[in-house]
Image (cartoon, rainbow, N blue to C red):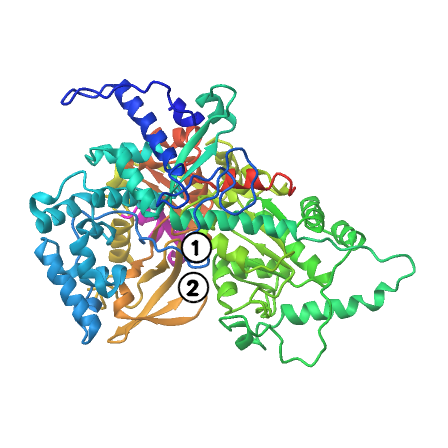
Amino acid sequence: MSDTGNGAPEETPAAPAAPGAPATPADKAAELARLAERIRGIERQGADGPGARIPGPGGSGSGGSGSGAVSAPAPAPAPASAPAQRTAEPVAPAAVPPASPATAAVPDGPRGDALQEAATVLTAGGAPAELAPAAVAEFGDEAAQRLRDDPWAVLGLPGVRPEHADGFARGLLGPGAEPGDRRRAQALVLWLLEQAVLRGHSALELTEVASGLERLRMPDPAAAVQAAVEDGRVLPFQEELTGAEAHTAGGEDDEPPTRTLLALERLAMAEDTLAEALIQLMATFVPGEDPEPGEDQAADEPASAEAGTEDGDAEDGDAEDGDAEDGDAPAGAGEEAAPVAPAAPGPAAWEAAAEAAASSSSTALIRAVADSALVLHTGGEAARAEPAALVAAARGLGLRAWAATWTDQGRDSFAALVEGGTAGADTPVATLAELLSGAAGPGRAPDGTLALDLLVVLDAPLLDVDLAATVLESLADGTRLVLSGDPGQLWSAGPGRFFADLLAAKVCPAVASRTPDFGPIGELVSGVGIGELQPVEAPDKEVVILTAKDAGEAVHRAIQLLTDSIPRALGIPAEQVVLLTPGHGGVAGTRALNAAAKARLNPGPGRFGGFDPGDRVVDSPSPGVTHPARVLDGDATGLHLEYADGSRRTVRPAEAARLRHGWALTVHQALGRRWPGAVVVLPEDAAPGLTRQWVYTAFGRGERHLSVVHAAGPALVQAVAERPAQPRTTRLRAVLAENAASAY
């Protein structure tokens, strides 16, 4: 793809192959070159045409000055704070799923008419009528007409695959359902990009999309991509290659090599918004100044510190103000104290706080935050003490400082670090969901931004593009933001690799912790992080590695460890041990492991939708978010659950499908949590998907004990040594590198 990379068309394009002749590799290469040139040609159709322009690495509206940067079109996208909808499990079923009992009943009124009309059209095309609720939810009350006009639009509904959509189109259009139909082309391009989103990509290379279209028997991939771009839901981008990629791609006439990327409009706009927000945060930051000689700073400090404490502790007394949807009342709005200027400690105050820190890594982090609006902090579990020291130091300087974690367990453990071992109700830490919703935290300022001066986000690798943009949009100009996490762990469930892209872009200071995770588990995980799987000394059986001849034996051994060996030998109760495995299906997936665990630990008929009182379950309201719980009881109102934090909620029957048994989890479901004991199960069919990143994350879920039961043979060692992570294609790194070169 040399001319795709350098942006220059071939002067004498190769002639197409004769009709009926098999395409040679040279023919395909020439076709890809013409495809890239045709996409570039969309830019030259003129501002009044329907085509989207191809932005350079600067993105749209970000003020980038990179060579060849062209402004992207400016449609009216949904705000980045509204997360994109994603399928909970990125596995398309072999057949269209039936409707849930909650959607089976047809309501009266206009919506009922829309459902009936949609069901009629679906049935006429040979599709299940049960898809009608999903169609109306996706396309509105005009769903029936939309499906008549564009039968391939059914591909946007859950569980529908291209072969299903083609069959539906033939059912409605008959001989008019041509493979090269423009409507089919648009739908297939969107579907390929949506499938890539489920794998974590926020964009795809043009050549990958073209190859996917070829596999789906699209006669003219170039025309298909152009149709999708002109429709406006797909945006094309040119991105300069750097490093090894640039060397491999090469270039011509001293032009830097580039690649052509395609992205769904909503994700393209979210990444651009995110990059702009990061740059804005850095550009508006003004560090404090030391008082001039003779100034009485002591008189001012208590007022600032008191104001910061009141704002930071407004969680209980001003919950209603903090929960205001539009942020029209700041936290503490009812207080009688006159507003004071925010604290702005100078270099001397920051340096004193840094020197008082308990470790050199904490000192380095405090110094970095003193001078910068955006700071990255990397380290393992033990390194979380460093951002805790930062929060305590910042609050001591009078700043409104808060921390946000991914899970309630992370919140409680971090609160204990901030308070020196005793977590209290006024500790300045909340889960990220609580902070953004207003359920906890400092509340909102009159302009709707969070009323704080410093935000530390733990578990930062778990932020996808949408959520990261939401966090940035919630911060006022000049707020300090610290993103902390372990770069070796798995990335977000949603698209993008926000934290990794920021580290790679090098647009802000990054502080790497020198605090290692101690003990045999920490030693093992540290070795995995550098690509080595070596035996470790475990005198108290902190780490046990067992081999199994096949997946069936692996399940047997794992259940034995859960129910007998670990509780008996180590004193860790079974309810504090988790089974971890790569996927839900298969002989040793979560379904099989949970069935075996239930049979041993809590047998029952599953009288409440497959669950019984006493069952361990996980509640997953959205991808990447998992809440462990225990079933208390069930009735017509739903399942009554007690969650890990002690709270109790009722999950309605219509939402019960999001529940799973929770003795066994995938490692993705376990992100942000740790257990006293963890048993990692690796069946032989898991070998192709294993990566160093997955193994690193899985092994790090155990606090006191880790057992590994694997039937993967040499694949485990190979994955650790040779496969760092599953690749993800994103645009954020290039956008940041182009636009933030002068920001740091």
Residue under the point 62% across and 77% down: 333
As drawn, 378 above or below 609: above
Residue under the point 36% across and 29% down: 37
Q: Is residue 707 left or right of residue 96?
A: right
Quarter location, residue 135: bottom left
Q: Position of residue 465 (x, y in %)?
A: 45, 49
Foreground residue among 130 and 302: 130
Q: Which residue is mark 2?
A: 644
Q: What amino acid is found at the position of numbered circle 2 in the picture?
A: Ala
Q: Is residue 186 left or right of residue 693?
A: left
As drawn, 71 above or below 656: above
C-alpha separation, residue under disc 1 versus residue under disc 2: 17 Å
Q: Assign a secondary structure to mark 1.
A: loop
Question: What quarter of the picture does the N terminus occupy?
Answer: top left
Are the residues at dot 1 and dot 2 in contact (C-beta closer than 8 Å)? no
Residue 114 among magenta residues: no
Judge the density around disc 2: few (<14), some (14-19), many (≥20) Cα neighbours within 10 Å: some
Q: Position of residue 122 (x, y in %)?
A: 13, 57
Q: Is residue 271 left or right of residue 478?
A: left
Question: What quarter of the picture does the C terminus occupy?
Answer: top right
Q: Which residues are magenta?
A: 557-584
Q: Which mark is residue 592?
A: none
Foreground residue among 27 and 100: 27
Q: Assign a secondary structure to mark 2.
A: loop
Residue under the point 50% across and 51% down: 273
Q: Main secondary structure of the magenta part?
A: helix
Q: Position of residue 513 (x, y in %)?
A: 62, 42
Q: Which residue is mark 1?
A: 572
